[in-house]
Amino acid sequence: MMTSKNGRWNWYGENEETMQISEEGTSLIKSYEGCRLEAYQDSVDVWTIGYGHTKGVKEGDKINQEEAEYMLQEEMIEYEGYINDLVEVPLEQCQFDALVCWVYNLGPTNLKNSTLLKVLNEEDYSGVPEQIKRWNKAGGVILGGLVKRREAEANLFQGKEWDKLS
């Protein structure tokens, strides 16, 4: 039996086509993550490097720009997978991009347990932008940067301009 999920046709796991983040989605991530070539602690004291890479990062780590680009490209495969696996409804490219950006920043556990995912999987596409915007806190504190990022992700989800936000 053939089934469709996310615009992919799957015949019991064979030839499954999955969505990938576009240049637009990658641009949003780069814009809001910024690129730092020396390890630093983010707003909740997690060691971070490159474009928001956290896995295995420790104080004193250094990379070059090429390594930062490669790390982001490689990590996108994982984060695209979360959206491809957990979202049960078809997505447009801009919607997929916005969700990959969101989960890259917040992690898969937050996605799995979110009202956002529930609303989306109930095909309430119009309810998703508001759900995206709810996630504007780090360490329990609303951060201006996260408010802007969530607004950008919500705009991208709706196919609107995201990079002209003030």
Image (spheres, rainbow, N blue to C red):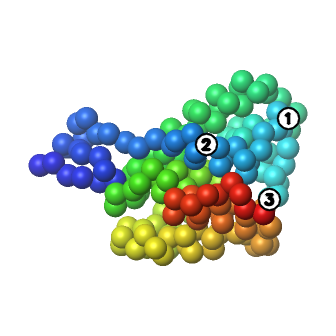
User: Which class describes the residues within 10 Å of circle 3: few (<14), some (14-19), or many (20+)?
Assistant: few
What is the spatial separation of the Cα atoms under label 2 and label 1, in whole angstroms?
21 Å
Q: Label for residue 26?
A: 2
- Residue at the extreme right of the image, as rendered: 60
* Discs 2/1, front: 2
* Discs 3/1, front: 1
Residue 128 located left or right of residue 32: left
Q: Amino acid at mark 2?
A: Thr
* Residue at 85%, 35% in the rendered image: 38
Residue 54 located left or right of residue 111: right
What is the spatial separation of the Cα atoms under label 2 and label 3, in whole angstroms?
23 Å
Image coordinates of residue 95 in percent, x first then y, are 48, 57
Front residue of 56/24: it is: 24
* Residue at 25%, 35% in the rendered image: 15
Vertical placement of residue 66 versus 111, above or below: above
Dividing the picture into quarters, in which one does residue 92 lie?
A: bottom left
Q: Amino acid at mark 1?
A: Glu
Residue 89 located left or right of residue 117: left
Q: Quadrant of the C terminus?
A: bottom right
Looking at the image, is mark 2 or mark 3 earlier in the sequence? Answer: 2
Vertical placement of residue 65 versus 91, above or below: above
User: Which class describes the residues within 10 Å of circle 1: few (<14), some (14-19), or many (20+)?
Assistant: some
Looking at the image, is mark 3 or mark 1 earlier in the sequence? Answer: 1
Front residue of 94/149: it is: 94
Image coordinates of residue 56 in percent, x first then y, are 71, 37
Q: Dot 1: what SS?
A: strand
Q: Label for residue 44?
A: 3
Dividing the picture into quarters, in which one does residue 62 lie?
A: top right
Residue contact at pointers 2 and 1, CB within 8 angstroms: no
* Residue at 29%, 54% in the rendered image: 5
Q: Label for residue 38?
A: 1
Image coordinates of residue 131 in percent, x first then y, are 55, 73
